Image (tube, rainbow, N blue to C red):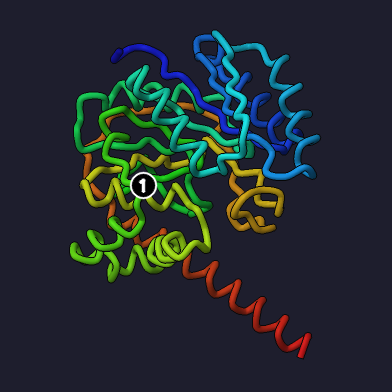
Amino acid sequence: MKNSFAPVILFVYKRLLHTQQTVDALKKNDLSSHSELFIYSDGPSNNADKKQVEEVRDYLKIINGFKSVKIIERQENLGLAANIIDGVTEVVNLYGRVIVMEDDLVTSPFFLRFMNDSLNIYNDDEKVGCIHGYIYPIKNIKSDFFIKGADCWGWATWASAWSIFEPDGEVLFERAETAGYMNDPFNIKCGYVQMLKDQISGKNNSWAVRWYFSSLLNNLYCLYPSTSYVVNIGLDDSGTHCVNTNIYDVQLQDQYSLKKIDVIESDENKRKFIDFHSKQSGLINRIIGKLKRVYR
């Protein structure tokens, strides 16, 4: 298992153009022909979405360029969170490791190599729970680094790490509060605290925030690249929990190098994460303030 190529899971719904761009970019990876691709197509949530879902499914049937392609068509609409949780659990328990993609993530040609090599390098390190392909547009990050927790825009994990996933947000909240994580400036400034509260109250159905806190509470670390191997093209108001913004746009990694590093949390880059999110919050608040003045 250590030197095998991890299967790739792609979760799709009704966005044909986004899905095509995601698949086309994956096919340009040199390891695509060695990778088994599992595609989970969620069922339409209403009659209005049915045609678009069917268009996506028609396209899925002609995908090639991978070692194999298996399509799982949901008969009912599970919703993004349930679809991902069920799909990841199913595949990772079969293969022991998995690379996870959604239908709005365009990757560098080196994405699959970074993921597979990282999975191999840290395979025996019980402190590492997640490999992440995306990094915010932050300047002066000199090398790959670790931060406790997990992330969700092009990521990979092992069955042992995913087994600690806790789906109950209230359980996570209580445990995180006891551990002091709900008062942690990093979790507050980066939005994790509010996101978990919103998940519990039903304002969102985020699986990602539950994955983050599950990993954090189990002292698992997430590996981040110095330059992003992933760009999110879905922040155009077209997807679940998405708004129209370009503040997360990045230049994709155009070369590849990887070496094993010590599993130590980077305090410097945690501060850079906080600064990035603080600036975005300030920008959003200024925009809201201007809109209020205009409409007043």
Residue at the image point whose x is 66% and y is 76% from the top: 287
**Residue beneath label 1, please?**
167
Q: Is residue 78 left or right of residue 59?
A: left
- Residue 254: x and y in percent read 56, 31
- Residue 280: x and y in percent read 55, 67
- Residue 222: x and y in percent read 33, 42
Residue at the image point whose x is 69% and y is 58% from the top: 244
Query: Which secondary structure, mark 1?
Result: loop
Q: Nearer the viewer, residue 143 or 57?
A: 57
Q: Nearer the viewer, residue 141 or 40?
A: 40
Up the image or down, 258 lies above or below 203; here it is above
Dividing the picture into quadrants, the one containing residue 123 is: top left
Q: How many marks?
A: 1
Residue 67 visible in the shown view: yes
Up the image or down, 121 lies above or below 15; here it is above
Q: Is residue 114 left or right of residue 270?
A: right
Residue at the image point whose x is 25% and y is 30% from the top: 160
Residue 274 visible in the shown view: no
